């Protein structure tokens, strides 16, 4: 008897749909809480590259399938190859993805539900706009497993300011959608059952504007974001991972926890989540 396939097995890691000038990119790893695997980051980078050349795509929406938006990097991949050069490639690829969003001459909106943690939170912070369901939660929990979220720190501190960013980074605690709105991580918070409609309305309104004018505004707004700030974050997190895997003590008060079976995308069960996260 043939075993039933798992949900999402052999499915594309990214779904694309364009309607009324809005390109919707849906991260499609629901069982992994849409953890940013190499394949998923590749797919997002390629889709954004195509969007840049597609005159019919005037606004891009990034969302996630299943119960979460994105729970950070895929810890299974990180654990599978613990060489420094592998870490460097992984975080360079993540930086390439974030810069692709910044450089895209079209607005990118994050449609956030469930959790957005670590690199998933970085993704929200990097997008031009973000709309969250009222039950969404956000965190940069790397500190809880002995790894500081160095690369998310760059985008997060630009989006919300240094003090609010450092509180998230140093405590690793989940914050509510309301708090995320208060500090500027998201633009709007809406009822969960109205999230898609709210994002569609916002995207549709922007899609109706002059594409040239919007592109100029996006370019000017992005100029101050494109610098070397990401690179130091890549180096710090790479060195931190090496120390953990080499058995060196990163935090004398925290023993880096071995991730639970599955990906980095396991939903956090408390503010001290050990999922995903660099």
Image: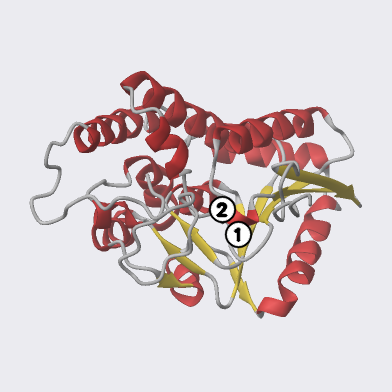
Q: Quickly name the residue at label 2.
A: 32
Please state if 216 lies on the left or on the right of 180 as rendered: right
Where is residue 221? Give x, y as percent. 57, 41
- Vertical position of residue 65 compared to residue 250: above or below: below
Q: Tell me, for residue 86, which label it has, or none.
A: none
Question: Which quadrant holds residue 220?
Answer: top right
Q: In the rendering, at what x and y percent does residue 213 appear?
A: 76, 41
What count of labels does the image hold? 2
Position of residue 57 in the picture relative to residue 229 (left or right): right
At x 89% / y 39%, what residue is drawn? 56
Nearest the eye: 200 or 265: 265
Q: Residue furthest front?
A: 1
Please name whichever residue, 59 or 205, is drawn nearer the observer in this view of the structure: 59
Precedes in sequence: disc 2 or disc 1: 2
Residue 113 spot, x, y in % from top left? 61, 67
Q: Work out whether residue 144 can be spotted.
A: yes
In the shown orientation, is residue 109 left or right of residue 2? Answer: left
Q: Is residue 219 visible?
A: no
Residue named by callout 1: 130
The answer for how far apart the CA atoms under marks 2 and 1 are is 22 Å
Residue in the image at 34% along x and 70% along y: 271
Vertical side of 272 occupied by 99: above or below: above
């Amino acid at each position: 008897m043939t075993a039933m396939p798992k949900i999402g097995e052999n499915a594309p890691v990214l779904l694309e749909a364009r309607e009324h000038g809005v390109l919707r990119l849906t991260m499609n790893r629901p069982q992994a809480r849409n953890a940013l695997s190499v394949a998923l980051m590749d797919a997002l980078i390629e889709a954004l590259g195509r969007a840049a050349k597609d005159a019919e795509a005037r606004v891009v929406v990034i969302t996630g399938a299943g119960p979460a938006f994105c729970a950070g990097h895929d810890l299974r991949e990180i654990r599978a190859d613990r060489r420094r050069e592998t870490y460097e490639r992984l975080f360079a690829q993540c930086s390439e993805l974030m810069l692709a969003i910044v450089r895209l001459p079209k607005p990118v909106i994050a449609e956030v539900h469930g959790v957005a943690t670590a690199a998933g939170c970085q993704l929200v912070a990097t997008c031009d706009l973000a709309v969250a369901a009222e039950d969404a939660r956000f965190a940069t929990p790397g500190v809880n497993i002995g790894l500081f979220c160095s690369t998310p720190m760059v985008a997060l501190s630009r989006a919300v300011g240094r003090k609010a960013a450092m509180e998230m980074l140093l405590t690793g605690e989940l914050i509510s959608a309301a708090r995320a709105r208060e500090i500027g991580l998201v633009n709007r918070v809406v009822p969960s059952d109205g999230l898609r409609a709210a994002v569609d309305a916002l995207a549709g309104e922007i899609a109706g504007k002059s594409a040239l004018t919007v592109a100029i505004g996006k370019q000017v707004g992005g100029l101050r974001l494109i610098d070397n700030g990401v690179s130091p974050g890549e180096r710090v997190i790479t060195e931190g991972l090496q120390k953990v895997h080499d058995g060196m003590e990163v935090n004398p008060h925290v023993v880096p926890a071995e991730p639970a079976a599955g990906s980095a995308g396991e939903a956090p069960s408390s503010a001290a989540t050990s999922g995903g996260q660099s």
